[in-house]
Image (cartoon, rainbow, N blue to C red):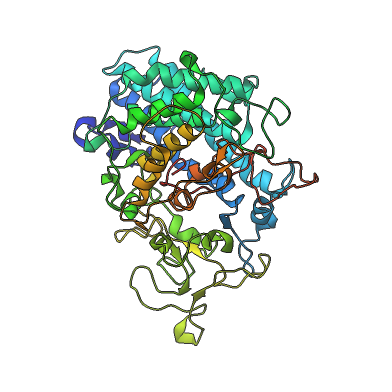
Amino acid sequence: MRKSFVKASIGAAGFVTLLLVPLQGCTNLDEVPLSAISPSHFYRSEAEVLAGLVGTYAQLRSTLDDYYNVSEISTDEMVVPTRGQDWYDGGTWLDLHRQTWSGTSAAAGAFFNGAWNALFAGVERANVLLGGLQMTTVPNQARIEGEARTLRAFFYYLLMDLYGGVPLGTTNEVPTRHPRVSRDSLFKFIESELLAVRSDLPVTWDAGNNGRITRGAVDAMLASLYLNAGVFTKDSAGASGINALGYNTCSGITVSGGLDACQAANNRADSIINSGVYQLADTFAKNFRADNASSPENIFVVKFIAADQLGLNFVMRALHYNQYTPSPWNGFATLAQTYNAFDSLDRRRGVFLIGPQNDVLTGAPVCERPGCSKGAPRLVFTTTIGDVTQAGEGEGVRIYKWPADPAHIAQNNGNDYAWFRLGEIYLIKAEAELAGATGTPTPLSLVNTLRARRHGRHRPRRAPARAHGRSEAQTRPDPVRQVHRLLAVQDAVPERRPQRPDADSPGADRRQPVAQAEPRVPLIDGGSHRA
């Protein structure tokens, strides 16, 4: 029979413990399985309801696979070069990086289809749970419904980012069987869902429930949604659509309550900053280490632990084969132009690995394959990649923002992944004010608060020059954002970025990434959804 983890004591184990346990193990292969969970045979107790909620949270881990790859590798932040017989994979990685994909190309089949399926799986899990809750009564039901609706809204947020308008379903039926709605309609649905459930959610959770949705998480999603309204309320480029060559401002777009979107973004940021719940971590690195569950800065995270199939595997993607045990994959690298955006005195360069390399666990020097004992040369990571179609083992700077967990189990590390952090909220507020929102402190003060933290240079940023009515911060990436947001998917969300022009048009820039024709320009800040 099936040994379901929901029989565990919710009160004794804690929600997070259950979240980090595989959903079930099959011990009787003669059992006739039900094709899917349905309200008629599940959700009869609080434990079963929480099990359904856990499954919806667990689907967040999938956002760091194909969605992450599309968001990062299509930018000038990251490339996956072909290294000998490794990483060609039918041309998928370079197709994605070069933005040469089409509906039938390698990248579309490998990444865009994968992201679509993973995100809609999250929607469907939430819909099944919400359908079941209509047929039962359990303690804390409104709060549980609020969590499920928020998670569903977040999955739709990511779908809206990549694909624009998508099928919108809120029942137990397969979501993709519903008709496609416009991006603006999806924007309004996400907004209305988040606003409707906010008051049902707690301000904080205890340690045993770390990672569950809070009011702060809802406010962070809304702040990002509103700041991106210049893109997220439009389906295409053109005179009244997305500006393909310039800044897409949130100003002038009316959202719920009759507010200007920029002002609404500022207000949501203020709600988080003034809540007293979050504070900037004393070091930038604290938000990414294996013990980052205790970071006071992280607002909404994907939970990971050092256990089989439950850990973060970012070290495997970037490190050389000989830098870690088990052997990593030696794939992802950053581009020279991104690395060189940080001057040599900037301590934030510490997230990069460059030059002679060591084992990240033991500190011992390492060599290229077949290893030092076989006479191979010392492993040296170079700034440049001569040819991405035939790169050497050590070509390309590596990003080591989420360092290896000393207690890792194989490739599974216990670092949580923060989708939203307080550093990002500071930058959302700063940009909203630059775009016309009324608020204090000034954008310059907000940015300098981040710069003063002990993660980098203490020198304050000078007041930005103005260009054509917009500040410098709106016309080109700011290095303070570039480091904070490096390799955090949110730094890639299109926000108000210009839409990529047609590839054959004058001035077309294939290095400006997009998924649904929206570029992802890395403006690295505080490490999460945009920070």
Q: Quadrant of residue 347?
A: bottom left
Residue 213 appears in view = no
Say if 359 sits above or below 250 in the image.
Answer: below
Residue reaching furthest left?
12
Is residue 514 found left or right of 463 in the rendered image? right
Q: Nearer the viewer, residue 189 or 121?
A: 189
Q: Identify the residue at horizontal 50%, vertical 29% (top origin).
A: 436
Residue 188 visible: yes
Name which residue lies at 53% across and 28% down: 156
Image height of 420 relative to 328, above or below:
above
Percent across and percent down for residue 240 are: 70, 25
User: Does 65 appear above or below 86?
Assistant: above
Q: Where is residue 412 in the image (x, y as percent from the top left)?
A: 38, 55
Asked whether, in this view, residue 365 is left or right of residue 244, the answer is left
Residue 203 lies in quadrant: top left
Which residue occupies 38% across, 16% down?
133
The residue positioned 37% from the left and 28% from the top of the image is 53
Q: Position of residue 26 (x, y in %)?
A: 40, 39
How many callouts does the rendering have? 0
Across and down, in percent, residue 73 comes to 59, 52
